[in-house]
Image: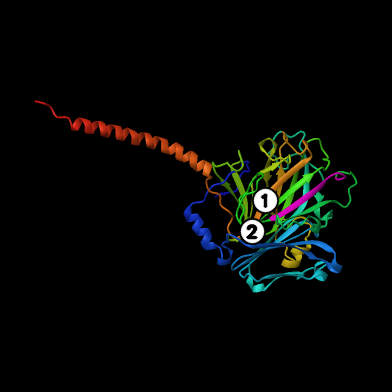
Amino acid sequence: MCVCGEHDWGWGRCAPSLVLLLSLLSAAPFGLRGEETRQVSLEVIPGQLGTSQNLLHVRAVGTNSTLHYVWSSLGPPAVVLVATNTSHSTLGVNWSLLLSPEPDGGLTVLPKDSVQFSSTLVFTRLLEFDSTNVSDGAAAPPGKTYPPYSLAEFSWNNISDSLDPATLSATFQGRPKADPTGAFTNGSIAFRVQAFSRSGRPAQPPRLLHTADTCQLEVALVGASPRGNRSLFGLEVATLGQGPDCPSVQKQHTIDDEYAPAVFQVDQLLWGSFLGFVQWRPVAFSQQQKGRESALSCQASHLHHTSEYFLPQSPIVRAFFGSQNNFCAFNLTFGASTGPGYWDQHYLSWSMLLGMGLPPVDTLSPLVLGIMAVALGAPGLMLLGGGLVLLLRHRRHSEYQSIN
């Protein structure tokens, strides 16, 4: 693993050494070392008077642990992650507290002493930049900055309408409550959540390797009218810091690009001593048919503390963590001033994986292993064949006896 520095984009993976893998295993609590399969359920928590308040609970039960993902669009879209060391932990919601101005204690996981890890992600703002006169796609910010859209000021669909138990997925879809320019008249932003009961890969790029300890989030901006001819979009993402410091961000590199051709990098954010993580490939797509021709670079800024400016508050985060203000944030920017871009089809999608325990580690694919075997095996076979020829020739000469 490499500490995150310059964000050159690529889609790859690098397998850590055995020593590093063993150190990660020893650092993680026993209940967070992962399980091959889990019993996963999705539930929309009913609000007061039976109405939905868009609170989605993903519960993944293993042999000796339970993972809870609580997603909500109360305020800005957010998720609270909680891992426990028992298969019997439960989520408690006090709606009166959660919807009050002081929601502390409105969200709990019981028994409290079973909680091994907890953190959160909050998607606070949709960013937009005009890159018309910008030639350097790595500029920060990448062009003129338009006033951001606060995702706390969006109205969202009823999550129950999109709940799909068969695929373990649900979608939060929203648009601004006030839209004076009409930018979202025919557009929306969607947050599609999907859980998994076992390991595998999605059929569509970027095909991140998932496990039963993870959830995938796909963010899609569709049909919104940009405010510039060549607008770039981005997301502001916030999380709780670990003590006085922000979580660490790392990169992985590899030569193996079978699952996402031409992309040689995976970025990941790590909470604590490998207790939780977020992974993404630094790539987005400007078409629904995701492929190399529609791939956009994804630039991530460094994490920074947010104490110097206002951050939209999430009721579920306040309800579970109390009035903490140790938040860190970073920005994701999708695309560059040169095409392709959102302006092609007014479409943009980006995916990330979040989970608890050890991050999934990609190894060399069967295709690459086969190529290596052929590349390394052919010279070996030639040497072996040459050696056999010389040996046979030597035996023929050694068995010859002169008549004299």
Position in image of residue 334 (x %, y %): 71, 42
* Front of the two marks 2 and 1: 2
Considering only vertical position in the picture, is 176 above or below 274? Answer: above
Task: Determine the secondary structure under disc 1.
Answer: strand
Q: Tell me the residue that label 2 is attached to.
A: 197
Residue kind at label 2, given as amino acid type:
Ser
Taking depth in this image into account, of 130 and 66 the one nearest to the observer is: 66
Q: Tell me the residue that label 1 is attached to.
A: 352
Q: Residue at x 64, y 73 (%)?
A: 113
Q: Residue furthest top?
A: 404
Examine the residues drawn in magenta and state their main secondary structure.
Answer: strand
Position in image of residue 288 (x %, y %): 73, 41
* Residue stretch in magenta: 184-194
Q: Is residue 88 visible?
A: yes
Position in image of residue 231 (x %, y %): 78, 39
Taking depth in this image into account, of 232 and 83 the one nearest to the observer is: 83
Name the side, left or right, on which 133 lies relative to 353: right
Residue kind at label 1, given as amino acid type:
Met
Q: Residue furthest left?
A: 404
Q: Is residue 382 magenta?
A: no
